[in-house]
Structures are given as structure tokens and as C-alpha cells.
Amino acid sequence: MHLRNFLQLLCALLLTLQAFAGGMSAWEEKTPKGNNIYYDGTAGGWITLTLDTTEVMFRHFYFYKGCTIATDDSLHYIINENNNTIQRFDNEAAWKAAIKAQGLNPLWKREYNDAYGTDKFGHILLLIFFPIPLLLPILWLVCLISLFFTSRKFFTARKHFSWIYPVIVLLVILYDNIPQSI
């Protein structure tokens, strides 16, 4: 009964407090070439890329071959971060032709929007709601240690899990930390 009263009091306090979420979605990151890219958390989803003294605002983008290819509703950009040049297009067809002419069409495009800086927090929530990723390293360690014992039970499964799991973890880490398109 004591725990129930405590939970009721906690809910009553939490429900009476005001929560302000403005700015919680703001982020600032570095591009693969070291320039600043940020989003101030306001409605509309405008992302700003700063090259030396020039700022470019857009809504969707991807990185490829040292360039940031960006677009919004009416303007399209090819931002070459190697030499800090910006190509601006009012026409989507001309922009796509320039992308094709410069060889900036990746085989696999990793396109981002205003959630670029905050999508990394999803992994933390995933670990909270689904504890399986926390159990897999423990299972891997048990399998690795059990390979040194003479038991033949599930030996093939343990042997394969011992090398497959680290490879998958490495691929996920690379995927999460390298924002470039392929």
C-alpha cells in the first residue's frame, strides 16, 4: 500500500508540472569535412550549414564525395566542402543534371532531415524498452568462454555466434557513425 501511495503522489506531481519541449530537438554536428551543420529546433525543419562566413539553409540533405547535396521546397544546392563552393539551383531538373554530371549519384543514398542530430537518441530508448541488446553481449561472452570447454553440445552454434555477433556489432557501429552515402 505504501508503494501505491508513493506512485500516486509521483504521478500527481509530474502531471501538474509544465513541460517545455522547445529547443529539445535542437542539435549541432560536424559534417564529414568538419563544417558546422545545425538545427535550432524551431518548427519548419530548416537546417543551416556554415561554410567559413556563408550560411546555407535547407530541409533535406546527404553527404557524398566531400559534398553536401541539399534541397528544400524550391531551392537546390550542391555544396562542395572540399573547396567551399556552393552551386544554387532554382530548377530541380538542372540540379539533378548537375548531380549526374558531377558523379554525385550514390549507389546507396543516406538522406537526412532535421532529425539528423537527434536520431542517435533512439538507440537509448530502444535499449530501455527492449533489453535484448543488453543480453546479447552477455550471451556472446558466455558462448566465447564455453568454446574452451569440452562440451560438444551446440558447439557449431556457439562457434558461429562467437564471430558473427562482433561482425554485426561492428557493421552497426560503422553505419551509425559514418554518415556518408555509398
Image (cartoon, grey):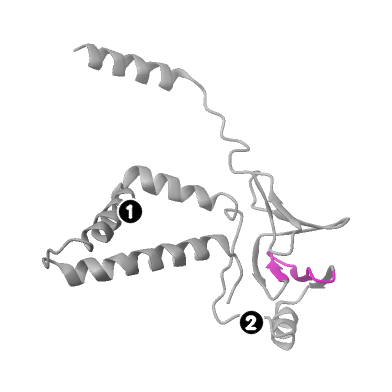
Above or below, 8 against 25 in this view is above
Residue 10 pos. (x, y %): 36, 18
Above or below, 134 against 49 in this view is above
User: In terms of depth relative to the viewer, which is nearer, 82 or 165?
Assistant: 165
Q: Residues within 10 Å of mark 1 (few under 14, many from 20)?
A: some
Above or below, 74 against 182 in this view is above
Separation (CA) of disc 2 from disc 1:
38 Å
Q: Is residue 86 magenta?
A: no
Looking at the rendered structure, the kind of residue marked 1 is Pro
Q: Quadrant of residue 108?
A: bottom right
Q: Is residue 74 magenta?
A: yes
Residue extending farthest right: 53
Q: Residue at x 17, y 69 (%)?
A: 155
Lateral position of residue 97 relative to residue 172, left or right: right
Among numbered discs 2 and 1, the one appearing first in the sequence? 2
**Segment colored magenta:** 67-83
Identify the element where label 2 is drawn: loop
* Residue at numbered disc 1: 137
Residue 3 pos. (x, y %): 24, 16
In the drawing, what numbered circle is on residue 71?
A: none
Q: Residue at x 61, y 54 (%)?
A: 114
User: In terms of depth relative to the viewer, which is nearer, 166 or 177?
Assistant: 166
Lateral position of residue 27 relative to residue 162, left or right: right
* Residue at numbered disc 2: 105
